[in-house]
């Protein structure tokens, strides 16, 4: 089994298309097809179901994908480790992050990293904390800035960034704003909620707070970005329970403390592989993060 066969296999699995994968890899489509056939002959099983429009993984292909990604990540780390010993940091930094993450200014951190390590290619992916955890565990990301989740894995370690309470945001004409007092989950059960997709960290923290309080709530308006959430609140279409720092993003909205939810606070972390599996680029980024001035 050759590394290029695994590289070709992963590219086709990602693009679900031979032509697009071949263009991305800068190889001919016939050469890519031959590489996949060679891998299938060696493993004695089909890896893809081929149709005229797309290709999908077979059960054997799905089993191979995770292992192939880990092998390629280890090979990349080996190259980067040798380059680091030679005094030059090269290769790629694959970073994941939630949107509007607390405790780190991602753009500023990456700018400092690029200035210090210009030979490292930076790849950034924004996603929810659940997906980011899986990506780091699978070796597809070097590290991720995410919200601490209840899932645990032996393949990851977490470095705490910050912890803050959850806050209720609402329109200034809303009845809660008129009262101007801290509220409990029990007082919010009948409200119309605006919230994020269940994989995003703020949604997970809010769900955990209400579950611990024994309050069932319904999210009627579900969005995938902060600005859409704030726009809906600005039109008085509902309320939201969000991390405390969100209150600065739309000063026109009213912010109220959420009582009785300390154990379900919003806590952000850096997710990394075990030390022996952490890439030189990820270690260099964490060194910059440790040395940064407080935001």
Image (cartoon, rainbow, N blue to C red):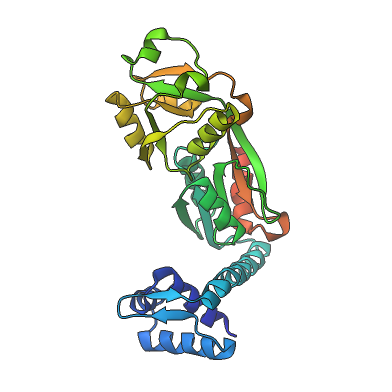
Residue 250 screen position, x and y as percent: 36, 25
Residue 212 screen position, x and y as percent: 60, 30
How many numbered circles does the render carry?
0
Is residue 180 depicted above or below 127 in this figure? above
Q: Is residue 156 visible?
A: yes
Residue 170 screen position, x and y as percent: 37, 21
Q: Is residue 142 visible?
A: no
Left or right of residue 233: residue 11: right
Residue 113 screen position, x and y as percent: 53, 49
Outermost left residue:
235
Is residue 75 depicted above or below 198 in this figure? below
Image point 57% across, 80% down: which residue? 3
Image point 63% across, 51% down: which residue? 272
Is residue 263 depicted above or below 62 in this figure? above
Front-lying residue, 30 or 86 = 30
Image point 63% across, 58% down: which residue? 280
Front-lying residue, 177 or 36 = 177
Front-lying residue, 289 or 64 = 64
Left or right of residue 228: residue 78: right
Front-lying residue, 51 or 4 = 51
Left or right of residue 63: residue 19: left
Quarter location, residue 1? bottom right
Quarter location, residue 6? bottom right
Image point 55% across, 49% down: which residue? 144
């Amino acid at each position: 089994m050759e590394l290029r066969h695994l590289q070709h296999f992963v590219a086709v699995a990602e693009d679900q298309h031979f032509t697009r994968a071949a263009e991305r890899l800068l190889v001919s489509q016939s050469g890519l097809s031959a590489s996949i056939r060679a891998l299938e002959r060696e493993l004695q099983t089909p890896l893809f179901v081929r149709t005229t429009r797309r290709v999908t993984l077979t059960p054997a292909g799905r089993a191979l994908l995770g292992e192939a990604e880990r092998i390629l990540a280890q090979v990349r780390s080996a190259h980067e480790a040798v380059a680091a010993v030679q005094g030059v940091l090269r290769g790629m930094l694959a970073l994941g992050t939630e949107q509007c993450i607390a405790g780190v200014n991602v753009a500023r951190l990456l700018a400092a990293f690029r200035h210090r390590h210009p030979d490292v290619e930076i790849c950034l992916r924004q996603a929810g904390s659940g997906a980011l955890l899986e990506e780091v565990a699978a070796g597809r990301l070097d590290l991720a800035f995410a919200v601490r989740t209840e899932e645990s894995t032996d393949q990851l370690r977490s470095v705490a960034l910050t912890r803050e309470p959850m806050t209720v945001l609402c329109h200034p004409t809303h009845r809660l704003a008129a009262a101007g007092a801290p509220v409990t989950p029990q007082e919010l059960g009948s409200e119309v909620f605006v919230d994020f997709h269940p994989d995003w960290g703020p949604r997970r923290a809010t769900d955990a707070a209400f579950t611990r309080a024994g309050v069932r709530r319904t999210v009627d308006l579900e969005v995938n970005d902060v600005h859409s959430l704030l726009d809906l609140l600005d039109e008085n279409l509902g309320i939201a329970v969000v991390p405390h720092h969100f209150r600065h993003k739309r000063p026109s909205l009213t912010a109220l403390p959420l009582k009785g939810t300390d154990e379900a606070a919003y806590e952000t972390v850096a997710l990394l592989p075990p030390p022996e599996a952490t890439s030189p680029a990820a270690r260099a980024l964490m060194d910059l993060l440790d040395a940064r001035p407080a935001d």
